[in-house]
Amino acid sequence: MPHEPAPVMHVSRTARILIASQAPGIRVHNSGLPFNDASGDRLRGWMGVEREIFYDRNRIAIVPMAFCFPGHTADKGDLPPRRECREHWHDRIFAAMPQIETVLAIGSYAQAYHFARLGRTIPKGMGLGDLVRNWRDFAGAKPLVLALPHPSWRNSGWLKRNPWFESDVLPVVREEVRRLTQA
């Protein structure tokens, strides 16, 4: 591994919502707190929650596809999540959290894993925009899976080109989060 392993996740037997993400970035790797960066600020805005609720493990579980920062590509982008975490831990972790009612699946790796583990077939070659736009066709009942783009600044262009995301999808996300995080 390019860095000393420093797993970053929040698992819980009481949280009813799961944020399933890609892998921690270098800032999160260094802080040990998931989404402790600008992406987290945007994600909390999408969800309509303050940091206090977001980081309350009793309310929200956060499990990335890779628990540690995977390193950088030659052009300084983040490498994809390493498979070892998923292969060794994910099925066991999610079997131990049957109370999860909604999964916010952020990014293609998390989406592919969670839809597949729940037996929900995504058509081969379906892009992020179509998956997010047509979320009702794939979300299922329990747990409900909502596909989201990564909240990174790198997706700002996608968000500008797809204003329906804010008007059609985010109200559903906020309502689910509100419903599942109320004390």
Image (spheres, rainbow, N blue to C red):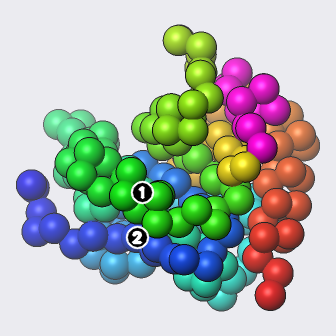
The image quarter containing residue 45 is bottom right
Residue 131 falls inside the magenta stretch: yes
State if disc 2 and disc 1 touch (CB < 8 Å).
yes
**Residue 39 appears left or right of 68:** right
Find residue 7 and report its horizontal and vertical position in percent. 27, 70
- Residue at left offset 53%, top offset 11%: 125
Is any part of residue 2 visible from this angle? yes
Residue 39 falls inside the magenta stretch: no
Question: Secondary structure beneath disc 2?
Answer: loop
Q: Quadrant of the C terminus?
A: bottom right
**Residue 134 appears left or right of 71:** right
What residue sits right under mark 2 in the picture?
Answer: 9
Is any part of residue 38 visible from this angle? no
Q: In this view, does 92 lie above or below 132?
A: below
The residue stretch that appears in magenta: 129-141
Find residue 150 and report its horizontal and vertical position in percent. 55, 46
Q: Which of marks 1 and 2 is nearer the N terminus?
A: 2
